[in-house]
Amino acid sequence: MSRLEVGVAVTRGSFALDVSLTVGSGEVVAVLGSNGAGKSTFLGALAGLYRPDRGSIVLDGRVLDDVPVHRRRVGLLSQSALLFPHLTARDNVAFGPRSTGSGRRAARETADRWLAEVDATALADRRPSELSGGQAQRIAIARALACEPELLLLDEPFAALDVDVTPAIRSLLRRVVRAAGVTTLMVTHDVLDAVVLADRLVVLDAGRVVESGPTADVLRRPRSAFAARIAGLDLVPGRSCPEGLRTAEGTVIGGVHPEPVADGESAVALFSPTSVAVYREPSKGSPRTMVPVRLAAMEPHGELVRLRAGVPDGGPGWVDGLAADVTPAAVADLGADPGDELWFSVKAAEVEVYPAGR
Ligand SMILES: Nc1ncnc2c1ncn2[C@@H]1O[C@H](COP(=O)(O)OP(=O)(O)OP(=O)(O)O)[C@@H](O)[C@H]1O
């Protein structure tokens, strides 16, 4: 079991990544972030595909910076299985142990053990062209772990699978990664991968870590707009004020402070889309915060309809992407279409204000 300590800066064209991160021995960390946030660049630096401009990667006390890729003891599982087409499943799995010095027989035994671990013993003699996508990915999992990596990198490991096989492969990966106790870093777009597999979430934005913490904590109390979006919550950034939160342009969002936040401190207001009511006109004298929006989109959301806000003419940018989940009957009463100017409204008692950042 190995502890990973990374502090790297990587430049690709005009994009700059600067990330410091520690992954405890045997810990599974998920790296999330929107498109272009730098997730693949970060993983590529760890895998040895990109040379950092500065910084270092230390795995179990070994500095990896100048270690050739094949000696790093870093396993990589990608979206596609990338099996050798001319080798059987067993020989694909045995390839790693063979190339690190195991004899033919020992490598075969290791391969058979890992094929059993991933419930693929019956597939041992098949070639990749005779495997389904899910079966091939199981073999790829066995192959990655048969090398006994000190660090396992998962790059969107389920992105290329059919949706109906993804849950089974996801839970299989969870089982074998936990059993192997291997230190793991996973890049994913899917919050479900993080919930099922990861101890901790790290959110990247524009090449920087904007949020990090235990998976459940980040999803319960997101500090970044991206994490709030994946957790299904609305988030408004600003500064704490006695009434709740004041946005940069001066809107006050009434809210409660579940934990102490100093007046004027950088903070975020969080609320559930189900606590947002939607009106055609602002209601006067209401104890609710009323925010003008332009309706950007409407989509089904379970038994409700999710109304997605865009910025109205001259309105503040932070309303962009706010969600309101309302009943189909309420949508019919409202008679709203995308492009209409509406008011989102939320009660102070349903807004929680927390310090921003960790
Ligand atoms: N070969 C390249 N040359 C210059 N810039 C690049 C190159 N490849 C990627 N970039 C830029 O680096 C930034 C980060 O890209 P990266 O692929 O790491 O993001 P990502 O978070 O993995 O995105 P996605 O979720 O879309 O896969 C992007 O702004 C991208 O435009």
Image (tube, rainbow, N blue to C red):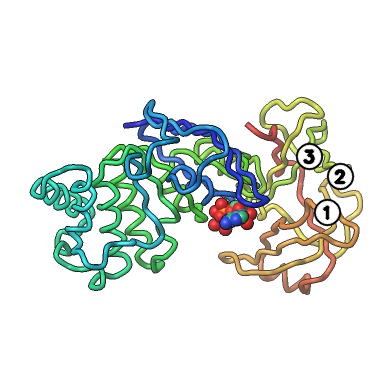
Examine the image and state in which quarter residue 198 appears.
top left
> Ligand 1 is located in which of the four quadrants?
bottom right
| Residue positioned 69% across, 58% down in the render | 323
Please provide percent x and percent y for residue 163: 41, 67
- Measure the alpha-carbon separation of dots 3 and 2: 9 Å
Q: What amino acid type should be assigned to the residue bearing mark 3?
A: Gly
Q: What amino acid type should be assigned to the residue bearing mark 2?
A: Thr
Label 2 CB sits under 8 Å from any ligand 1 atom: no
Q: Which is nearer the eye, 320 or 277?
A: 320
- Per the image, the residue denoted by label 2 is 251
- Measure the alpha-carbon separation of dots 3 and 1: 15 Å
Residue neighbourhood size for the residue with mark 2, other residues' Cα within 10 Å, grouped as few (<14), some (14–19), many (≥20): some
- Of pointers 3 and 2, the one earlier in the residue sequence: 3
Give the number of the mark in front: 3 or 2: 3
Q: Is residue 260 visible?
A: yes
Q: Which mark is residue 291?
A: 1
Q: What amino acid type should be assigned to the residue bearing mark 1?
A: Val
- Measure the alpha-carbon separation of dots 2 and 1: 9 Å
Q: Is residue 358 left or right of residue 92?
A: right
Quadrant, the N terminus:
top left
Quadrant, the C terminus:
top right
Residue neighbourhood size for the residue with mark 1, other residues' Cα within 10 Å, grouped as few (<14), some (14–19), many (≥20): some
Asked if the residue under mark 1 is in contact with the one under mark 2, i.e. CB atoms within 8 Å, the reply is: yes
Please provide percent x and percent y for residue 221: 61, 40
- Per the image, the residue denoted by label 3 is 238
Please provide percent x and percent y for residue 268: 72, 39
